[in-house]
Image (cartoon, rainbow, N blue to C red):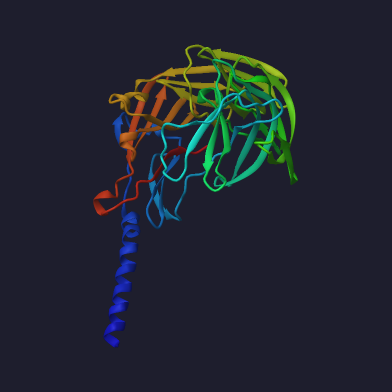
Amino acid sequence: MKKITNFMIFIALVSILCLSLPLIIARQAAFPLQDVIGNASALHGVSFDGTVNLEEASILISYDERARESHKITKPQIYPSSSYTSFTYVCEDDCKVISGWEKEKDQNRTDVAYYKRKLNKASLYVSVMVTENQQLVNDFGFIKTELTYIADKEHILKEDGTYNTEEEQIIPGSIQPEDMAESGGTTQPVYHNGYYYILPPSTTAMSGQNYIYRAKKMKYPESYSINADSEHSYYDMSTSLKAEKLTNVSMDRNYLALQISSDHLFVFSEKNQKLYITKYDLNGNLKDEISIKDFHYFDTIYKNDNYLCFSYDDTIQILNTDTMQLISVKNKQLLSDSVNQEYVSIYDILYKNGRIYVSMNADAEYFMNKVLVIENGKTLYVGSLDFLKLKPSLTELPADCFPVKFRR
């Protein structure tokens, strides 16, 4: 019996050691920046962090304003959720079915059959999802807009359907334009001084009127129903936001983003490959507008102090939100990883003291983070940070890391 007990204790100790070994190695590891172009002194004055996720913990890798590295073991980190708004298409009022159900060619399940049919129009409601503490997402419900999608020969509106074997009928589902580019993507609600500022991502394919909304969270949500035809029955809706219209926006543009900087609203919209940046005060009064030619779609706007930064192709744009002056920089380093047509990801852009700092990598080099420093359009520094530095010491490493983010 004593031998069995000792053996069980031995097994437990080995298990603990196996679980602890990655953390022991992680504490002893180092993650130095490797100079590719220039010297890391170009990073002096800027601090930043990255994270490597292990099974039981995470390694937070930090660089101070002298580019000196340190790291510590933390609780497992997860990707922070993002706030967003998106459209929900609702069949109400004069919405009618204008074709029969057609079975989809691609059926990926044997127990369920999928169908589609055409509708003549749909009303648009904006769904608002808000992140708190960077992880918890709250569903604030819907805001009814004055926007409608009206179908014609060029603009096709389709409704999904699923065949219910028990009821032996097709159950209507979600509604979307056939061309997803017409549906509007997502925009981020912006929280400022107790209010949420919301810009529905309308497109030129939509009819009616779009607005910038200012909303305040109510103590208790309100629920209501939307009457529809006999087939759709009704929609159960709810909202936690009391919204007001600040100002209407032009309907001949596609709306991409809303930001707040210098106590002003900045609306990003596009028309015929031309980007418009429109400045309003917090009450929706128009203050200024500029435009950029030969614009291509961007994913993210990065904010620090009174600057808004974004990029597309090999171009970085820095907007001074006080003066509405743009600094435009082209840099081939932004495309240097795409020689083999690999997708290049930019994770952060910071503008400080006349220099542009960029964190990026390519899909094929997911764990190899690059840090760029650009001044007057020239590359001062390129450094690489290998998040797989632990790999030689471990048999396995989870494929997860948070690339460099510059501290604001």
Q: Position of residue 116 (x, y in %)?
A: 52, 31
Q: Is residue 315 above or below residue 195?
A: above
Left or right for 379, reference 99? left
Above or below residue 37? Residue 15 is below
Return the residue nearer the eye: 259 or 113. Answer: 113
**Residue 300 visible within the image:** yes
Specify whether residue 63 is in view.
no
In this picture, is 368 found above or below 260?
Answer: below
Q: Quadrant of residue 123?
A: top right
Q: Say left or right for 403 vs 317.
A: left
Question: What is the x, y in percent for residue 157?
Answer: 57, 24
Give the residue furthest to the left.
392
Please state the total of marks drawn on the protein image. 0
Quarter of the figure with residue 93: top right
Q: Out of 219 and 162, give the one closest to the viewer.
A: 162
Q: In this orientation, which residue lies closer to the viewer: 77 or 333?
A: 77
Q: Position of residue 5 (x, y in %)?
A: 31, 83
In this view, the residue farthest toward the front is: 168
Point 34% across, 54% down: residue? 26
Q: Residue at x 37, y 29 (%)?
A: 344
